[in-house]
Image: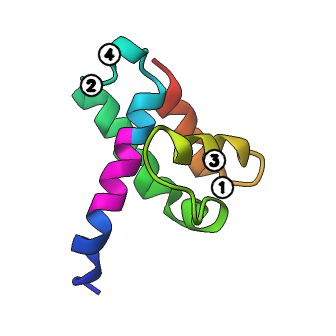
Amino acid sequence: MPQLLPRRLPVFAALAASLALLALPAHAQSQASPEMRAKAYKVIRTCKADIQQFCKGIEYGGGRVAQCLQANAASVKPECRAALDEAMTP
C-alpha cells in the first residue's frame, strides 16, 4: 500500500489547488495562502471516501471536485460537509 501513495499524491495536490482556487478571486488565484492550502488538505483527508463515491471521473482542477462535493452536500458525510464549508469560508 505505501507504493500507492506517491501515485495518488498528484491527485490530492490537484484537489487542494482546486479547492483553493474556487474560494479565491481570479486575480489572486495564483497565490493560495498556506491557510487555504491547509484547509484544502483537510478536505482531502476528510472527504476521501466521498470524493471517490460522488466525484469519480471528475477531472481535477478548476474547482471541479469542490463543486462536485458541494453539489452532493446533502449526501456526503457530515464531517466532509463541515470541512468543505470551512474551506470555502474566506
The local crowd at label 4, few if under 14, some if 14 to 19, many if 20 or more residues have their Cα within 10 Å, is: few
Residue at the far right in the pictured view: 74
Give me the disc on residue 28: 4
Query: Of the residues under marks 1 and 4, which one precedes in the sequence?
Result: 4
CA distance for labels 1 and 3: 14 Å
Q: Quadrant of residue 71?
A: top right
Give me the disc on residue 9: none
Query: Of the residues under marks 3 and 2, which one precedes in the sequence?
Result: 2
Q: Are marks 4 and 2 in contact (CB under 8 Å)?
A: yes
Give me the disc on residue 30: 2
Q: Residue at x 30, y 36 (%)?
A: 37
Q: Quadrant of residue 9?
A: bottom left
Q: Residue at x 57, y 64 (%)?
A: 57
- The residue nearer to you, when weighing 55 against 78, is 55
Does dot 3 land on a helix, a strand or a loop?
helix
Q: Amino acid at mark 2?
A: Ser
CA distance for labels 3 and 2: 22 Å
Q: Are marks 3 and 2 in contact (CB under 8 Å)?
A: no
Q: Amino acid at mark 1?
A: Lys
Visible residue check, residue 49: yes
Q: Which residues are magenta?
A: 10-17
Give me the disc on residue 68: 3
Q: Residue at x 36, y 44 (%)?
A: 16
